[in-house]
Amino acid sequence: METLVRIAEALGRFSARFVPSAFAIAVLLSLLTMGLALGWADAPPARVLASWGGGFWELLTFSMQMAVVMFTGYLLALTQPVRALLVRLAGLARGPSGAVVLMALVSMGLAYINWGLSLVASAMLVRFVVRRQPDVDYRLLVACAYFGLGATWHAGLSASAPLLVATPGHFLEKQLGVIPIDRTLFSPFNLGLTVGVVLVLTVLAWAMHPRPERTVRVDPATLEQLQDFVPPVRPSERSPAVWLDFSPLLNLVFGALGLLWFGHHLWVNGGWKAVNLNVVNFLFLTLAVLLHATPARLLKASEEAASVLHGIVLQFPLYAGIYGIFKATGLTERIGQLFVSLSTPGTFPAIVYLYSGVVNYFVPSGGSKWAIEAPYLLEAARTLGVAPEKVVLAYAWGDMATDLIQPFWALPLLAVARLEFKDILGFLLLTFLVYLPLVTLAFLLWG
């Protein structure tokens, strides 16, 4: 572990010095893509420029879908029932090792449901657990709270790529058609791999807890700063407007209508096969409205939830511009041919998994990255005769793999926990070194 901590510190210093902001990376990737289109695909400069600018607005629906995933997950995490559930869960931990096992299981379980919910609810659970188990290693506890973003989210119910290709009208429908989730998320391979990864990482969390004399406990001053969401106070004045804002009536009506629509949609469209990105977002929004009880509380929580959406709003148009270049300049075919030359039908899923993980470290956005990579990956799969659902799942698992060692999505968690990424990177790096070969082998055997 000491060696890993030294590696973590060195990697943290390297990232701080040489890895720029996510926006800067998006601009550099745009320039790189333009250069490849000009020099490799022999596209005319005017076409490259037009496809870049025109592509900015091709993925607005997709961008909004991704924003709603994070927004609704955050809203749910701030509801009173979820908070009460987290308090009860925190009481289940028995000793420091039991605390990190509990945190790992909850983080991965919540991320399977919704990655935004996992990020926020896991950060809240850190507060409750550490208050009950002050002898737990605080660094490892926070690291385990991040497990879900690296191990289960893109295999679960808020998975960008699998849910997108199951949604009628998605931007690849002409090329790919609609792939229902029973061929991706609910396939025996995906379910089995998810269970296996959860078991392995849970055992690893237990094994990584340091001895008492090497444990780094939470600083009392940090513990005092771990504050909870504060709902609005009802004004003393009495008026129809105040009554409506602080009454559960409207939330109950909206929630009942939303749940009725969800049940009707499943009933008339064949059950769970009809679940897609829009349906999942609708369900989580309905639950958030229902569980926040009043419009006033919902609006206060919405203000906090909206504060984490700036990255999606700013960066997704740039990645859409990159997608436009790939689609209009012939670059898709060139990269697809390269993948075909390096792969066989049996190795292609594993290669896609590893490649997706590498790109994710520099472009930490599963949704926007799918828009960039999907055209040439699917073209290569078609040439090799590989089923498109294998490409979707390999991409999804690779996309979340390097989240374990990438700080972008950990920032909300770290802000709540009052830690820096280098504090938890040693544990995450060891987890990554166990996780990567395990999943790579699974895709090799599946291919």
Image (cartoon, helix red, strand yellow):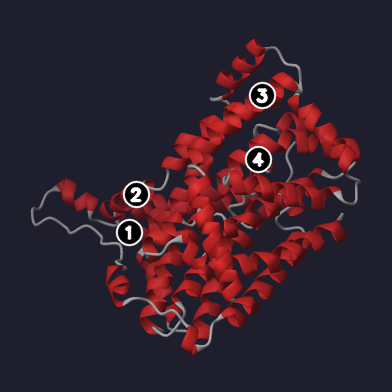
Mark 1 vs mark 3, CA separation in Å: 53 Å
Badge 1 element:
loop
For residue 59, say whether it is visible: no
Residue 245: x %, y % from top left: 23, 50
Relative to 187, is 150 on the left or the right? left
Mark closest to the chain's N terminus, 2 or 3 = 3
Question: Which amino acid type corresponds to the residue marked 1 in the rendered image?
Answer: Ala
Quadrant assignment for the N terminus? bottom right
Residue position for label 3: 35
Mark closest to the chain's N terminus, 1 or 3 = 3
Mark 1 vs mark 2, foreground winner is: 2
- Quarter residue 25 falls in: top right
Question: Which amino acid type corresponds to the residue marked 4 in the rendered image?
Answer: Trp
Badge 2 element:
helix
Residue 401: x %, y % from top left: 65, 57
Badge 3 element:
helix
Question: Which amino acid type corresponds to the residue marked 2 in the rendered image?
Answer: Ser
